[in-house]
Image (spheres, rainbow, N blue to C red):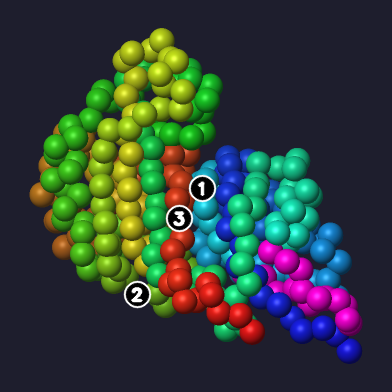
């Protein structure tokens, strides 16, 4: 008879440029997702049943995570006690050393906890670099980690004004890309926070290129539509470049039509980071 199955929530980060996204792909495909490597590392826990990860936030190819989350169930063999959180983290990280993936921490949770559906908020940050005339202008430490924009520096005040129209509860159909989930997922989302701010580049205090400027756009919501953040970023940057005016953001929301979104405006994946997934404290303290 097997021991009791134990559910854990893990917090993990990754550099997304080399992956097809966070979700696992079939072995028949040449591309791999972050989850493929997590599952491979989990084989070393030698559980009595294969371990699967339920990812909280499905980031796309090229998107990074400062902190994503997932839950997993570990069934140990008869008579063996559950792994401690520290041992679980150590084993997974030992077998992830060859990949830019790291498990930050883990905690035991109840069997009805779900990493995706129990989340109360998600925070995304998008990084933009301006003052570039070519991709080669970027410091090597910034490549694949920001959107290198060639159109000059941004009008911060206009972007901040435009961002206010996104706050609150709206139908974000215009800011959603087409996907198989569209017929079943509601386009109504509540954006709790939007901020546009100047930022620092990595090791920028040591850089000799004084023309480069960096910007961050931060968004907080319980959940987002497919590519919603990248479409919101692209529209706000277009405002910063004076290609759109702040009131156009309000008009795009009112259109409620993904075809109304301006062509060639969506931000690329490079600069997008999942920063944080938030849960109620009581959910993280509950154990079987």
Quarter of the figure with residue 225 = bottom left
Label 1 with label 2: CB-CB less than 8 Å: no
For the C terminus, the quadrant is: bottom right
Residue 104 location, x and y as percent? 61, 52
Q: Tell me the mark number nearer the camera, choosing from 3 and 2.
A: 3
State which region is magenta.
Answer: 71-85
| Earlier residue among tags 3 and 2 | 2
Residue sitting at 46 percent across and 51 percent down? Answer: 274
Residue 169 location, x and y as percent? 22, 68
| Earlier residue among tags 3 and 1 | 1
Secondary-structure class at tag 1: strand
State the residue position of label 2: 186
Residue sitting at 84 percent across and 60 percent down? Answer: 44
Residue nearer the viewer, 43 or 225: 43
Is residue 77 highlighted in magenta? yes
Residue nearer the viewer, 202 or 20: 202
Q: Which mark is residue 30?
A: none
Real-space Cα distance between discs 3 and 2?
23 Å
For the N terminus, the quadrant is: bottom right
The residue carrying pointer 2 sits among few (fewer than 14), some (14 to 19) or many (20 or more) residues within 10 Å by Cα, namely few
Label 3 with label 1: CB-CB less than 8 Å: yes
183 relative position to 163: left or right? right
- Furthest-left residue in view? 247
- Furthest-bottom residue in view? 1
Secondary-structure class at tag 2: loop
| Earlier residue among tags 1 and 2 | 1
Q: Which mark is residue 276?
A: 3
Q: Which mark is residue 66?
A: 1
């Amino acid at each position: 008879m097997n021991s009791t199955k134990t559910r854990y929530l893990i917090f993990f980060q990754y550099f997304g440029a080399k992956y097809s996204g966070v979700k696992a792909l079939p072995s028949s495909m040449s591309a791999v997702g972050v989850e493929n490597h997590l599952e491979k590392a989990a084989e070393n826990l030698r559980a009595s049943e294969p371990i699967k990860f339920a990812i909280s936030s499905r980031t796309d190819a090229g998107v990074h995570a400062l902190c994503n989350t997932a839950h997993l169930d570990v069934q140990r063999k008869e008579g063996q006690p559950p792994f401690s959180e520290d041992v679980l983290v150590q084993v997974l990280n030992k077998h992830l050393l060859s990949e830019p993936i790291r498990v930050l921490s883990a905690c035991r949770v109840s069997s009805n906890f779900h990493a995706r559906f129990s989340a109360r908020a998600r925070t995304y940050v998008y990084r933009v670099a301006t003052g570039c005339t070519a991709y080669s202008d970027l410091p090597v430490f910034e490549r694949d980690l920001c959107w290198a924009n060639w159109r000059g520096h941004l009008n911060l005040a206009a972007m901040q004004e435009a961002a206010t129209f996104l706050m609150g509860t709206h139908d974000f159909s215009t800011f959603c890309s087409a996907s198989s989930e569209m017929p079943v997922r509601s386009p109504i989302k509540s954006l709790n926070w939007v901020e546009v701010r100047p930022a620092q580049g990595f090791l920028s205090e040591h850089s000799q290129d004084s023309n480069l400027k960096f910007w961050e756009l931060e968004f907080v919501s319980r959940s987002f539509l497919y590519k919603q953040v990248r479409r919101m970023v692209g529209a706000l940057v277009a405002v910063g470049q004076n290609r759109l005016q702040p009131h156009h953001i309000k008009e795009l929301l009112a259109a409620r039509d993904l075809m109304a979104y301006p062509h060639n405006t969506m931000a690329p994946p490079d600069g997008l980071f999942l920063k944080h997934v938030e849960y109620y404290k009581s959910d993280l303290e509950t154990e079987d």
